[in-house]
Image: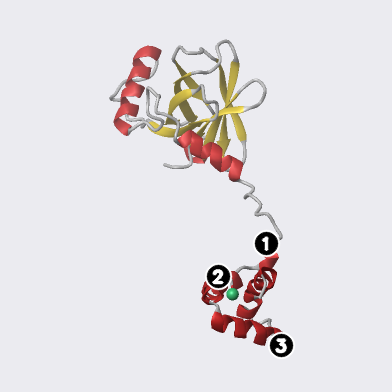
Amino acid sequence: MTGDEHRALRESLGDLAMGRLHGDERATVEAHLQGCPDCRDELAAIASVLPALRSVDHDRLDHSPAPPPDLGDRIVAAARAERPERRRRPRLLPVAAAAAAALLVGGVGGYLVGAHDPVPREPVAVQALDPAVEASAVAIPHTWGVEIVLDGDGFRSGATYRVVVEARDGRVVNAGEFIGTGARPMICNLNSSVLRGDAESFSVVDAGGGTVLRGDLAAT
Ligand SMILES: [Zn+2]
């Protein structure tokens, strides 16, 4: 047997293993295997991977797997989650810190009542969509509507921001405006006519209409 003949025979081992060889072809290869340990080893190797090959869905081999449509969002979210901690304040204020912040608001603002005031001040979970913005918020339910006390920095200096409260019934109600103070912290009281129980969320919107911060008022 020449080298070419042997090579051709080896190449037919796959067909033999898959049962595709018949008649004289099959007899020739099987006769060769009797005297060729190399080809027997090769056949054994082919047979060992056949179950895996059979499990491949050939229809799917023709398609490149498409990335899931939300992959980009998930990468951004993961990157944000892994961003080094550089916040001076936790994103979600613990209740005690929120109460302290509310007391501070009272002291600075001068017109909010003190700690004996029975009106509850709820810490609000906020999400800054502008990476420069760091903020926390407290919701205060009044008989005339919910007040948002926004404590933050990173709102662009001199830029005007609008705050709206989104009600459960879909209304989007103005709660006031403020001017960004850049890196200098600001504490801003924003009043809306949406009652606390009817409020779903609030948003801080920049002059271009982009939302830079959202607060969740649905969770109580
Ligand atoms: Zn051989």
Determine which residue is flagged by label 1. Answer: 61
Q: CA distance from mark 2 to mark 3?
A: 29 Å
Q: CA distance from mark 2 to mark 1?
A: 14 Å
Is the image coloured rainbow, by chain, by secondary structure, or in one colour? secondary structure
Determine which residue is flagged by label 2. Answer: 52
Residue that appears at 67% across and 22% down: 208
Mark 3 and mark 1 lie on one chain; the one further toward the N terminus is: 3
Classify 142 as above or below 67: above
Mark 2 and mark 3 lie on one chain; the one further toward the N terminus is: 3
Return the x and y of residue 87 as percentages of the image width and height.
40, 24
What secondary structure is marked by label 1?
helix
Determine which residue is flagged by label 3. Answer: 24
Residue type, mark 2 in image: Ala
Residue type, mark 3 in image: Asp
Give 106 or 78, whichever is nearer the viewer.
78
Give 196 or 201, whichever is nearer the viewer.
201
Q: Are marks 2 and 3 in contact (CB under 8 Å)?
A: no
Mark 2 and mark 1 lie on one chain; the one further toward the N terminus is: 2
Residue type, mark 1 in image: Leu
| Residue that extends furthest to the bottom in the rendered view of this protein | 23
Mark 1 neighbour density, 10 Å: few (under 14) some (14–19) many (20 or more):
few
What secondary structure is marked by label 3?
helix
Would residue 214 be visible to someone looking at this image? yes
The image quadrant where one finds ligand 1 is: bottom right
Answer with left or right where residue 201 lies relative to residue 98.
right
Q: Quadrant of the C terminus?
A: top left
Mark 2 neighbour density, 10 Å: few (under 14) some (14–19) many (20 or more):
few
Return the x and y of residue 117 as percentages of the image width and height.
32, 26
